[in-house]
Image: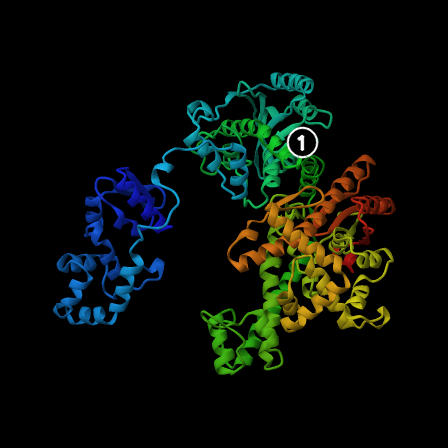
Amino acid sequence: ADDILATLAERAAAEGLEVLIVTGDRDSFQLVRDPLVKVIYNKRGVSEYAVYDEAGILERTGVRPDQYVQYAALRGDTSDNLPGVPGVGEKTAAKLINAYGDIDGLYQHVEDQTPKLRENLAAHEDDVRINTVVMGLIRDMPLDIEPSELLGIEPYDPDDVKKLFDFLEFRNLYERLHEAFAPDEVSFDENQELTVVLDQPVDPTRAAELLAALTATAAESDAPVALAGVIEDRRLTGLALVTDEAASAVVWLAPSVLADEAVRDALGALVAADGPGVVAHDAKPLIAAMGEIGIDLADLVLDTSLAAYLLDPSGNSYPLDELLAQHTAYRMPTDDGAPDGQLDFGESQIAPAEAAGRTALAAARLGHGLSVALEADGLTELNTSVEVPLVRVLARMEHLGVGVDRAELEALNADMTAEAETLAAQIQADAGEEFNVNSTKKLREILFEKLELTPQKKTKTGYSTDQATLEKLVGEHPIIEHLLRYREVEKLRSTYGQSLLASVGSDDRIHANFNQTVARTGRLSSENPNLHNIPVRTELGRSFRKAFVPAKERVFLVADYNQIELRCIAHLAEDPGLIEAFTSGEDIHRATAARVFDVEPSDVDFEQRNRAKMVSYGLAYGMESYGLGQRLGIRTSEAQVILDAYFEGFPAVRDYMEATVTEARNRGYTETLFGRRRAIPELRSDNPRIRQAGERQAMNAGIQGLAADIFKVALVRLDARLEREDLRSRIVLQVHDEVILEVPEEERERAAEVVLAEMTGAFELLVPLEVNLSFGTTWADAKD
């Protein structure tokens, strides 16, 4: 690329054209020629630039542009892995080149230098000579284009550019491109800045009348109402509503107004299921906060953050100002504290009313562009039927929370603290000295120097002491078993025991957050605290479930999809063998093992069944032979034999996996049966490892995405059915493919029927959806 720049610059200068080279690479300094060729160099990040002519290069480096390569060869370039002469920095290099003209002149006078410099110059002469060749830019590349052909800017197709920029995840560049090259089409002057005409304060009587009128007129025009709330500690402390989008008119309902009963009634009618509909950005906290004051926001039609996620699930967040710039001709004001999401006024100088007003108006303006984009990508149905209704379900789950036996959790935490201390003392006794058992450096010294145990793998800092290494050393010394147990106990205590206790509210319930816009596959996630990661593979980990309890006179109903990912594989691959195994009611892992190892189902042993199970679940995550070998503790070659046997037994599964990767590579994205898309640019990487990672993502995206969509549909159906039948049973928790309800004793039978019907009927696969149901007075009891 540098050589192409050099060739174009040389040709352009020969034609008398003026050239500016915009670069962060100092090698381009050698190209500067007054008056035609100059370099625009970013001195600091992308905010501070300098324009260099010949005088500027001399001032910047101490040498002329035609001497730059000689100068750079002496000091080297670490970014290009080109070593220079030790002890020769920029000042010394400039001094030497100015004194002797070039490298040849310097080495003719090498004996005149100080002893240390003379020694270094002599020892690194080969490096310097090579640098002069490598750093010198080629100025006569065989290019099929002349600089004069690059002078005009050809028209471009905005739709094609938009699709490309979306694929490349260029968040703000599209509108900036318009600003630069089509100013008449999209102008970003002061008129394009989002300006709110705020109506405040509004007295309760007028507010109630305004809300009633808004309900009537909006219903007639079929236009949804845009809202934004100010929320503090889950409480709604103010609300902004767009009353006239064309006029940028927004009304602010202060806390004192929201406290009025007539206002709440009118607001409830506006956001009810038969109202005009609501548009909001990050609506879940708003729905939950309105629920706290008895208002059910039941008719959300568009959540702009959720719509943005569907269009691009790879984003880490979906700030309102960025979305506005990406999808509209508007931008947020540039003053301090422009709102982001549901507003954080920590250091904002903007009044809550003004900030909420901006958020509401931005959501209204943004809603139009996002709706068009969803329709263009075939995502409208998924958004309308699944994701938007789910917002209200999750908001209600967060509002209800899940009960916790604080005493049980405190006792569990105390027990783990005591055991961790006992184990630490035992580890020190095993080592024969006191030391910090959490110090990797000291532990490495104890294990591999003092106790002379067998090192397994080496890292940059020394021999590894990670979990996999310790497991391979089991049996060599008692300290290993004690270390493994200590780490398990200490991790559970610090990661879960303490965080769960800190998350218990005054109502003895944990109100975690459930996220729809985090996982690229469409799966839900949990945070504050993360209830999805409570460990279940060990007895100690499972003991945390004992602390989760239902409200008084209620029980937990736990419903868990049985092998949903494997059923999705069977459906997507249409593999006759898998379909037969599921429809016949066989033990799927035993049936799989029988095919893989070519034995009768009755002859399948425990190890064969376990290996078949590992392969089946691994395929849902794109696992290959190396990963399978690691899980089974066998060589990669042996794991490959098992995988090959699996695909021989279920050939349609292999065909599906290969076809999925090919289709994703051609399209640039995967797509579930519900239309959920996931871009996988890694498939086009030149790096084999990145490309292979992309292939694994492509394999699992359709499977994981379909399973996620089915589970979300089930949650929406189940919540709606419970509400429709006026049952008091409520969903309080969701973990992976499992849903947990609090059920009054008298509703046990009916709740079980409803849960089973709605979960098994969420989607029609080629194999039946099965659900495991259980009741318990704690989460642990129900699971056991």
Answer yes or no: is residue 423 visible. no
Of residues 776 and 98, the one nearer the viewer is 98
Q: Residue at x 19, y 52 (%)?
A: 63
Position of residue 111 in the picture relative to residue 89 (left or right): left
| The C terminus, quarter of image | bottom right
Identify whether 435 is placed above or below 99.
below
Disc 1 residue type? Leu
Residue topped by disc 1: 300
Q: Residue at x 22, y 57 (%)?
A: 71
Q: Residue at x 83, y 59 (%)?
A: 581
Position of residue 486 in the picture relative to residue 147 (left or right): right
Of residues 391 and 378, the one nearer the viewer is 378
Identify whether 597 is placed above or below 671.
below
| Quarter assignment of residue 651 | bottom right
Of residues 412 and 473, the one nearer the viewer is 473
Position of residue 689 in the picture relative to residue 263 (left or right): left
Label 1 element class? strand
Specify few, some or many for label 1: CA neighbours under 10 Å numbering under 14, 14-19, or 20 or more.
Answer: many
Residue 219 in the image: x percent, y percent? 69, 20
Residue 742 in the image: x percent, y percent? 77, 46
Identify whether 39 is placed above or below 290.
below
Residue 436 in the image: x percent, y percent? 49, 71
| Quarter assignment of residue 225 | top right
